[in-house]
Image: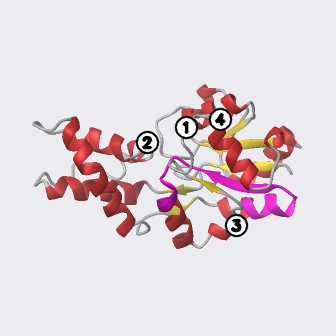
Amino acid sequence: MRTVIFDLDGTLADTSGDLISAANSCFRSLGLGDLLDAKQDAGTALRGGRAMLTLGFSRVDGFGHDEIDRQYPNLLEAYAQDINSHTVLYPGAMDSVEQLKSAGYAVGIATNKPEGLAETLMQSLGVRDAFASLIGADTLPVRKPDPEHHLEAVRRAGGDPRQSLLVGDTATDRDTSRNAGVPSVLVTFGPGSDDVRALEPEATIDHFDELHGVVARLIG
């Protein structure tokens, strides 16, 4: 079966607000206040918890890598407790998913968010059942950009890896698809800092309304 695998953060949903909030809770616990800004630092949020902690601590003196390691579990706990106050699905995302499924494609998720958090978020958003598979950062011994992360998401969705593609928003997603020998479609509307067109994916989309046509062109 032809299969479309989606990245989660910055592709299906803008999760940056809740991620920034979780990081700021760590900084506040140390008496530092909110070191990250929800809009200015949204791109860093989608690179993960350690990236946010690194950026925040770079703005004050006296905190190094040891504190990042200490605070990372606290960040994950804070995020798990308040995972969906600000997160929103991108316009047209789920309509596009349903359109693909109606046309006979399998759909799944491959994310570098821990699997448990990704499952919780998708359930909270009410859309987990729309996806036949979900592979998180800790589901396998490897994560994106290792190709097995994508390939296993395809297999668990019941698809054929040779007839699949990856929809994402970053260089990591582009590299994953290339390593797997499949096309990538990168969205231009995510808050990440990558210039997705300069990454030379097989296609880009400015809105999810465009996805079905692009998928049909790339994998039939």
Q: Which residues are magenta?
A: 97-117
Q: Which mark is residue 147?
A: 4
Give the x, y percent position of residue 10. 53, 49
Instruction: Residue 102: say if magenta.
Output: yes
Residue at the far front in the pictured view = 141
Quadrant containing the C terminus in the rendered view: top right
Q: Amino acid at mark 2?
A: Arg
- Give the Cα distance between marks 2 and 4: 19 Å
Q: Are marks 1 and 2 in contact (CB under 8 Å)?
A: yes
- Per the image, the residue denoted by label 3 is 130
Q: Earlier in the sequence, mark 1 or mark 2?
A: 2
- Per the image, the residue denoted by label 1 is 170
Q: Amino acid at mark 4?
A: Pro
Give the x, y percent position of residue 193. 46, 36
Identify which residue is drawn at 35% across, 40% down.
51
Q: Which one is nearer the viewer's eye here, 56 or 71?
A: 71
Disc 1 crowd rating (10 Å Cα; few below 14, some 14-19, many 20+) is many
Q: Can residue 92 be seen in the rendering of this structure?
A: no
Q: Amino acid at mark 1?
A: Thr
Q: Amino acid at mark 3?
A: Ala
| Mark 3 or mark 4, whichever is nearer to me | 4
Q: Can residue 126 be seen in the rendering of this structure?
A: yes
Q: Are marks 3 and 2 in contact (CB under 8 Å)?
A: no
- Give the Cα distance between marks 3 and 1: 23 Å
Dividing the picture into quadrants, the one containing residue 172 is top right
- Give the Cα distance between marks 3 and 2: 25 Å
Vertical placement of 128 versus 63: above or below?
A: below
Q: Earlier in the sequence, mark 3 or mark 1?
A: 3
- Per the image, the residue denoted by label 2 is 47
77 displayed left or right of 10 = left
Q: Earlier in the sequence, mark 2 or mark 4?
A: 2
